[in-house]
């Protein structure tokens, strides 16, 4: 750690990790609703819908806190200057966490906007916007005062501003259900396949540059190419969600063609990562951080690129749309691209923020391999359930619940895998919260 | 490639995709009124949409394929189970789902709001969305239906059975719902006449019956379906 103000990042990371644990616990409860029959009295008090709102909002909240903490960690090193106002960074954290807590309590009490993934009701939306504005202002001021512009900074700031602007599309009440979904995807799709990819590209470029010592000019050049392809395919690719909502039929063409190209920038990211690692200029200090960075790139490609491509063409999406195939892809993609990215950042920054240059990787390795293999298998079992659903319900025309009864076995297997995944999460979180320095060879 | 040309690749890529996207967004706004029958989008529909969001229906059910996957898609629910079917499930979920492996919460929704919800769902059912979902498509017979048609029954009663929502709860040859009993051999237990009474008012035949009265059927449709089912022995 070179700058005092970077320390604030540790708080963002710590809270993010605790929310991650809660998120996964909610996931286990959701899946239990598929596997067991929940009695009516409990369904009346705590329905699946409420738990789902919690699972997904916790997800978004912890990941955004992770990105923000990551930004507060990176920006001082990129600009060569402390954060403009650490106090504002604190205020922002308090505002966002308070909003999150109120929102979760509100869901439990039945206070919701009722739009999937965007359940946070309007008054709280404005608190989120306030938190985001404080953040952007603080980061922007730090960069402007420093006047040491780099491409990484620019992409990071651009991605964050884009991310904040898109959030606004999800706030109004739309009278027409079709238009409502149209703009819902400006938040969901343009986030994960647009703005978040910009942020990811910038953060990955920074970490890889630091880890490998590869020349900044090379890293930044390829960063431009990656995000250029992300934007080109991702923006018009939004159309892959407009096939069946009552929008004009040209979206079948535009959405199908552009989104089918979306795996290309992800593949490029994997190639770049591998190239940098091969041409590294410095000694490997923490091999586990490298494993994570590479694992993130590869899982990103599998979850988003391969699993996304599998159901993005309209001919296939007609049968798989809104089934467990979607769930399979949602989990693999979010985990591979954004959970692993955050965990990479945490392992890069958290030990160092505690004065540990070289950390002991034993628990971290166990945690990473447990989570990754469990999630890979969950992706497969959710996927099998989804293919069964698409065939039995959509092709054969079986009733919804009849088809679900044939999927029950696979949901049960997924629950077992989910428990393994949870164990991996707990190990990882404990290791990150209490990192140990590596024992030097020869004993210290 | 130089860093400069990489920048231009980024710039042109972003702008061109954004121009296409925003242009088509503008055009979508021109066409959406016709595709969604916005002329029928009354205040009552909007009130129903608000209720749909207030009770967080969408985090268990998908609509137009989006939302939670825990319960059946609602895009064409009005065509599938009818207004009465929707009302019954919203008023008495604890009865409607008493034997089902998954329950729906009893949210004590006032009758007025249920009415709005039905209006909203009916309007959604009319959206021209490329004939999705496939299982509710009227243009495509499902394989299960094709098998039925090719097999025993091309009778009008079979058609009523398949298209008026009976199969959401009941099954034949393993195709259909599990909500109510399978009806493959119903003719052994009930006569044609009993079936006709039952469909009109289930409680008149069996006071403990949970099936809602099928008020949407015309007299002729009810007769035909009773004739069809009464012969399944
Ligand atoms: C890291 C990037 C990505 C993440 C985090 C992600 C996540 C998700 C999630 C959560 C959904 C479900 C949304 C809902 O309906 O509730 C979804 C849907 C979808 N995604 Fe992705 N995705 C990513 C990238 C991609 C890519 C690159 C493609 C295509 C090549 C893709 C194709 C699709 C398709 C076609 C659907 C719609 C599924 C349906 O019709 O039900 N995704 N994605
Ligand atoms: C033990 C771990 C987990 C289990 C058992 C689990 C289970 C579930 C279940 C059952 C749903 C609801 C699907 C439905 O509507 O029917 C869900 C939704 C979701 N979960 Fe998880 N989850 C877990 C971990 C995660 C993780 C780690 C992530 C992200 C990194 C995640 C992201 C999501 C997303 C994005 C959705 C919404 C999906 C969509 O709309 O398609 N979950 N989860
Ligand atoms: Fe998408």
Image (tube, coloured by chain):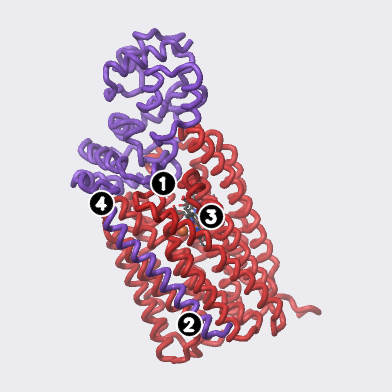
Tell me the number on the disc at residue A331.
3
The image quadrant where one finds the C terminus of chain A is: bottom right
Looking at the rendered structure, the secondary structure element under dot 1 is: loop
Query: Does the residue tagged 4 have its C-beta within 8 Å of any atom of ligand 1?
Result: no
Residue depicted at 42% across the width and 77% down the height: A158
Q: Name chain B's colour.
A: purple
Q: Distance between the residues labelled 1 and 3?
A: 18 Å
Nearest to viewer (mark 4 / mark 3): 4
Which residue bears the numbered disc 4?
B33
Tell me the number on the disc at residue A153.
2
Residue A383, image x, y percentages: 57, 47
Q: Name chain A's colour.
A: red
Name of the residue lying farthest toward the left: B43
Looking at the rendered structure, the secondary structure element under dot 4 is: helix
Residue A144, image x, y percentages: 40, 89
Few, some or many C-alpha atoms within 10 Å of disc 4 (few <14, some 14-19, many ≥20)? some
Query: Does the residue tagged 3 have its C-beta within 8 Å of any atom of ligand 2?
Result: yes
Q: How far apart are marks 4 and 1 (CA)?
A: 20 Å
Query: Does the residue tagged 1 have its C-beta within 8 Å of any atom of ligand 1?
Result: yes
Task: Look at the picture and state if A289 lies above or below B203.
Answer: below
What chain is tagged by disc 2?
A
Q: Are marks 3 and 2 on the same chain?
A: yes
Tell me the number on the disc at residue A435.
none
Which residue bears the numbered disc 1?
B65
Are the two marked residues, 4 and 3, in contact with CB atoms closer than 8 angstroms? no
Are the two marked residues, 4 and 1, in contact with CB atoms closer than 8 angstroms? no
Looking at the rendered structure, the secondary structure element under dot 3 is: helix
Nearest to viewer (mark 2 / mark 1): 1
């Amino acid at each position: 750690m070179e700058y005092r103000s970077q320390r604030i990042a540790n708080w963002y990371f710590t809270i993010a990790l605790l929310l991650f644990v809660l998120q996964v616990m909610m996931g286990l409860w959701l899946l239990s609703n598929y596997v067991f029959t929940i009695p009516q009295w409990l369904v009346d008090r705590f329905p699946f819908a409420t738990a789902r709102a919690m699972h997904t909002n916790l997800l978004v909240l912890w990941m955004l806190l992770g990105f923000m903490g990551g930004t507060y960690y990176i920006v001082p090193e990129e600009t060569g200057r402390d954060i403009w106002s650490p106090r504002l960074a604190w205020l922002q954290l308090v505002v966002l966490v308070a909003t999150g807590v109120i929102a979760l309590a509100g869901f439990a009490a039945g206070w919701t906007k009722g739009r999937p993934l965007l359940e946070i009701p309007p008054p709280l939306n404005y608190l989120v916007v306030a938190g985001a504005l404080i953040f952007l202002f603080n980061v922007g001021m730090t960069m402007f005062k420093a006047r040491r512009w780099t491409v990484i900074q620019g992409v990071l700031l651009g991605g964050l501003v884009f991310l904040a602007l898109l959030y606004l599309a999800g706030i109004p009440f739309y009278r027409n259900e079709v238009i409502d979904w149209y703009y819902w995807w400006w938040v969901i799709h343009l986030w994960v396949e647009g703005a978040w990819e910009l942020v990811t590209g910038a953060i990955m470029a920074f970490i890889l540059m630091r880890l490998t010592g590869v020349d900044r000019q090379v890293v930044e050049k390829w960063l431009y190419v990656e995000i250029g392809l992300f934007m080109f395919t991702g923006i018009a690719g939004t159309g892959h969600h407009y096939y069946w909502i009552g929008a004009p039929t040209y979206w079948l063409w535009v959405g199908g063609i552009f989104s089918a190209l979306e795996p290309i920038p992800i593949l490029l990211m994997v190639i770049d990562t591998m190239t940098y690692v091969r041409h590294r200029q410095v000694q490997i200090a923490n091999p586990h951080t490298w494993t994570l960075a590479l694992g993130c790139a590869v899982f990103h490609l599998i979850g988003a690129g391969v699993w996304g491509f599998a159901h993005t063409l309209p001919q296939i999406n007609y049968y798989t749309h809104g089934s467990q195939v979607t769930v399979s892809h949602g989990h693999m993609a979010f985990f591979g691209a954004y959970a692993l990215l955050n965990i990479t950042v945490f392992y890069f920054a958290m030990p160092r923020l505690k004065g540990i240059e070289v950390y002991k990787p034993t628990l971290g390795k166990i945690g990473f391999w447990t989570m990754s293999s469990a999630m890979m298998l969950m992706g497969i079992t959710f996927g099998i359930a989804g293919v069964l659903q698409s065939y039995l319900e959509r092709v054969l025309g079986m009733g919804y619940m009849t088809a679900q009864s044939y999927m029950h076995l696979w949901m049960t297997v997924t629950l077992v895998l989910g428990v393994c995944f949870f164990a991996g999460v707990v190990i990882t979180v404990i290791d990150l919260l209490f990192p140990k320095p590596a024992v030097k060879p020869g004993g210290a | 490639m130089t860093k400069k040309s990489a920048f231009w690749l980024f710039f042109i890529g972003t702008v061109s995709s954004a121009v296409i996207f925003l242009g088509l967004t503008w055009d979508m706004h021109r066409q959406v009124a016709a595709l969604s029958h916005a002329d029928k989008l009354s205040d009552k529909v909007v009130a129903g949409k608000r209720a749909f969001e207030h009770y967080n229906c969408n985090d268990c059910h998908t609509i137009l394929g989006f939302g939670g996957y825990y319960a059946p898609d609602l895009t064409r629910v009005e065509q599938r189970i009818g207004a009465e079917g929707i009302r019954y499930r919203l008023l008495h979920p604890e009865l409607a789902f008493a034997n089902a492996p998954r329950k729906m919460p009893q949210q004590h929704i006032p009758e007025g709001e249920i009415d709005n919800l039905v209006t909203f769902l009916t309007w959604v059912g009319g959206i021209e969305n490329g004939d999705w979902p496939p299982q509710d498509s009227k243009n495509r017979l499902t394989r299960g239906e094709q098998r039925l048609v090719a097999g025993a029954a091309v009778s009008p009663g079979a058609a009523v059975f398949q298209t008026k929502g009976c199969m959401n709860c009941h099954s034949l040859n393993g195709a259909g719902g599990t909500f109510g009993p399978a009806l493959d051999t119903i003719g052994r237990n009930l006569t044609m006449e009993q079936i006709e009474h039952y469909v009109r008012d289930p409680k008149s035949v069996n006071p403990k019956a949970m099936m809602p009265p099928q008020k949407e059927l015309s007299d002729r449709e009810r007769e035909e379906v009773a004739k069809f089912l009464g012969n399944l022995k």
